[in-house]
Structures are given as structure tokens and as C-alpha cells.
Image (cartoon, rainbow, N blue to C red):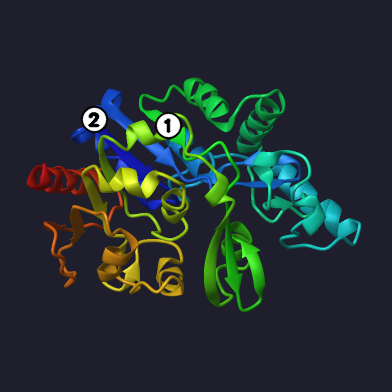
């Protein structure tokens, strides 16, 4: 049995090759929900959605988000309407007093749908409408995710990290922003001062998460701060990881991040912005998989390979290196 911690695009790319070593029936994926937002009244769970579309064979592998060949008529119409009505564009975080009204799960991450700043496809939007309706009917996020996983015929078990609101907020030189506002709306340009996972201290891991963490855990090449960090901020998760076998795959190729703003975010939490910083980010790790050209050293067993993942064959190579690392510590 193996459990992957997944967020962003790095770990989904790795999962393209997971079946070469781990059977789907024995594989669980715990997905980051710190990036979730409510936009225009719809609850969007980007990291969960990537895994749903990937498992359902619909994922746009050029962007690693959304549905391949999706149309964007609604998004375009929203932009046209905002322009015609002389309404502001860009991320529009709802006022503070509105952040804790409505769905509790959306606390601290509510955005206006005017001039929708995230490009959401039309088929993609159908998923968000369905999820939001399930939540409004009384489903937890876990229950809604299970229904959607069944609809997409997922062969692995997919769990959101929590049924409670946890918002990844980036404190920048230009003010506090939700991660999606920082990364999508502002392209990661504002300087980062620190990162907050608001709500995590009172949140609980979703049903099944702590049990899944009793199996061997693989942390894929996702951003350690905003993709994996929200999970680590949940009560009980660090202790569970300290008790089990954990293999971490580096999200860095040399000093360059595998994808996303990992370098600057690592610096903001006082971790070296490179593979060497994983010792700070993941103090419970029992082994590492790093790139062959990486000169980072650890006290724990380390397997080297070409960790660049451009296609499923690359993913299989990295997964086999993970298997070798697991063998060394179990």
C-alpha cells in the first residue's frame, strides 16, 4: 500500500507512471485543498480537479489543468460583459466581512466572478457546479469528491486533505493574497514575506487521511510550501508521517524549481530554495529521490536519477527510483 501527497502539477506528472510499480487498488492520493477558492459562487478545488481529469483521461497535458479541448465561452462572455459594463478586471477578493458568510468551507477564499480572473473551461465549470451543488445539499468535500471520482472512473482512492477550510494566504510586499491571486492573478511577481495556512489549527484531516498515512508515503515533486505545506499544517499529520516510511522526490532541477514559485516560497519559510532545503521542509523524510546532477547531500538514503518528467516513460523511471528508495528503508 502506498499513499501519494499531491498538489500542483509535479506529483500528477509523477502519477502518470505510478502504475508501473504500484497497483491502483493499493494506491491512495491525498490532495492539497489549500489552493481551493470560491469564485462567482462556485467552489473550485484545482488540485483535486487535476487528479479527477487525469484519472478520467480528460486532462489537458499541455497546461496540466483543465480539460483537453475544452471551450471557454462562458469565461469569454464574462470578460466581455465586464468590459461593456466598465467593471474592474483582475482578482477581486470579496470584502473581509463576506469571507466568512455562506459556505464555511469557502472561508477566507471568496472571489467575485466579475471578469473571472481564472480561465475556467465550460466542461470544467460543469464539475464546479456539480461539486458546489453537492456541498449545498449537505455533502462534505470528501463525500462530494468520492461521487466525482466515481463519475470519472478513478481506479485509485482520492482523498481531499480536509473537509474544513484551510486557505493558503501569501503575505507579500503588496499585501496579503490568496495563493491563486498571487500566482494566477499576479503571476507570482509580488515579493513574498511569509505564508499562512489560515484555519489549519482548527481543521481536521479528512476521513481516511490519517489511516492512509500509516502506509508508505511518497511526497511527489510538488511545491513543498503551498502544495504540501497545507497538509503538513493539519493537526496529526506531521506525527503520522514521523511514524511511517516517507520518500520525498525533489521538486528542484539543480537550483531551478520543477514548476511554480517553489524557490521564493521556500526562502519565505527559511528553507534553502533548492533540493537541500527539503531537509528543513520534510524533517520526517526517510529517503530522497533527487536529480543525477544535483549535488545535495542528506544523512538519509538518497537515490539519484533524471527526475525531469516530460512523458509517462519519464514518470516510470522516477517511480522505479522511488521503489528503490523504499526498499532501502523498509
Looking at the rendering, in which quadrant would you find the C terminus?
A: top left
Q: Is residue 326 above or below residue 214?
A: below
The percent position of residue 75, horizontal first and vertical second, equals 72, 47
The percent position of residue 238, horizontal first and vertical second, equals 36, 49
**Element type at mark 1:** strand
View extreme (right): residue: 85
The answer, for residue 296, to whether it is visible in the render is yes
Q: Give the residue displayed 60% in from the left and 65% down from the top.
A: 182
Q: Give the residue displayed 77% in from the left and 62% down from the top.
A: 89
Q: Earlier in the sequence, mark 1 or mark 2?
A: 2
The answer, for residue 253, to whether it is visible in the render is no
Q: Which residue is mark 2?
A: 1
The percent position of residue 85, horizontal first and vertical second, equals 91, 57
**Which residue is nearer to you in this view: 143 or 82?**
143
Compared across the picture, whether 303 is left or right of 127 comes to: left
The percent position of residue 58, horizontal first and vertical second, equals 47, 34
**Which residue is nearer to you in this view: 241 or 268?**
241
Q: Which mark is residue 199?
A: none
Q: Is residue 277 above or below residue 284?
A: below
Within-10-Å neighbours for mark 2: few <14, some 14–19, many 20+: some
Within-10-Å neighbours for mark 1: few <14, some 14–19, many 20+: many
Looking at the rendering, in which quadrant would you find the N terminus?
A: top left
C-alpha separation, residue under disc 1 versus residue under disc 2: 14 Å
Q: Give the residue displayed 53% in from the left and 51% down from the top.
A: 201
Q: Which residue is mark 1?
A: 158
Compared across the picture, whether 225 is left or right of 168 comes to: left
**Which residue is nearer to you in this view: 62 or 14?**
14
**Element type at mark 2:** loop
Contact? badges 1 and 2 (CB < 8 Å): no
Amino acid at each position: 500500500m502506498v499513499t501519494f501527497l499531491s498538489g500542483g502539477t509535479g506529483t500528477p506528472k509523477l502519477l502518470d507512471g505510478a502504475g508501473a510499480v504500484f497497483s491502483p487498488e493499493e494506491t491512495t492520493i491525498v490532495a492539497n485543498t489549500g489552493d481551493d477558492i470560491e469564485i462567482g459562487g462556485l467552489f473550485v478545488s484545482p488540485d483535486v480537479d487535476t487528479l479527477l481529469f487525469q484519472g478520467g483521461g480528460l486532462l489537458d497535458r499541455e497546461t496540466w489543468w483543465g480539460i483537453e479541448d475544452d471551450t471557454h465561452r462562458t469565461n469569454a462572455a464574462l470578460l466581455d460583459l465586464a468590459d461593456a459594463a466598465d467593471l474592474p478586471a483582475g482578482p477581486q477578493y470579496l470584502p473581509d466581512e463576506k469571507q466568512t458568510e455562506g459556505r464555511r468551507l469557502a472561508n477566507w477564499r471568496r472571489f467575485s466572478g466579475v471578469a473571472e480572473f481564472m480561465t475556467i473551461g465550460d466542461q470544467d465549470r460543469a464539475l464546479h457546479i456539480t461539486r458546489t451543488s453537492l456541498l449545498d445539499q449537505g455533502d462534505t468535500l470528501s463525500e462530494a469528491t468520492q461521487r466525482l471520482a466515481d463519475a470519472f472512473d478513478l481506479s485509485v482512492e482520492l482523498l481531499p486533505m480536509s473537509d474544513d477550510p484551510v486557505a493558503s494566504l501569501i503575505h507579500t510586499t503588496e499585501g496579503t493574497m490568496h495563493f491563486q491571486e498571487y500566482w494566477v492573478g499576479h503571476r507570482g511577481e509580488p515579493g513574498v514575506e511569509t505564508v499562512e495556512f489560515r484555519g489549519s489549527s482548527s481543521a481536521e484531516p479528512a476521513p481516511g487521511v490519517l489511516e492512509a498515512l500509516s502506509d508508505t508515503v511518497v511526497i511527489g515533486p510538488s511545491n513543498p510550501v503551498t502544495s504540501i505545506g497545507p497538509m503538513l499544517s493539519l493537526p496529526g499529520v506531521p506525527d503520522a508521517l514521523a511514524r511511517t516510511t516517507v520518500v520525498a522526490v525533489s521538486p528542484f532541477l539543480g537550483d531551478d524549481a520543477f514548476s511554480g514559485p517553489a524557490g521564493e516560497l521556500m526562502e519565505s519559510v527559511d528553507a534553502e530554495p533548492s533540493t537541500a532545503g527539503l531537509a528543513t521542509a520534510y524533517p520526517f523524510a526517510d529517503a530522497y529521490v533527487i536529480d543525477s546532477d544535483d549535488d545535495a547531500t542528506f544523512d538519509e538514503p538518497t537515490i539519484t536519477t533524471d527526475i525531469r518528467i516530460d512523458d509517462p516513460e519519464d514518470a516510470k523511471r522516477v517511480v522505479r527510483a522511488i521503489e528503490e528508495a523504499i526498499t532501502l528503508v523498509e
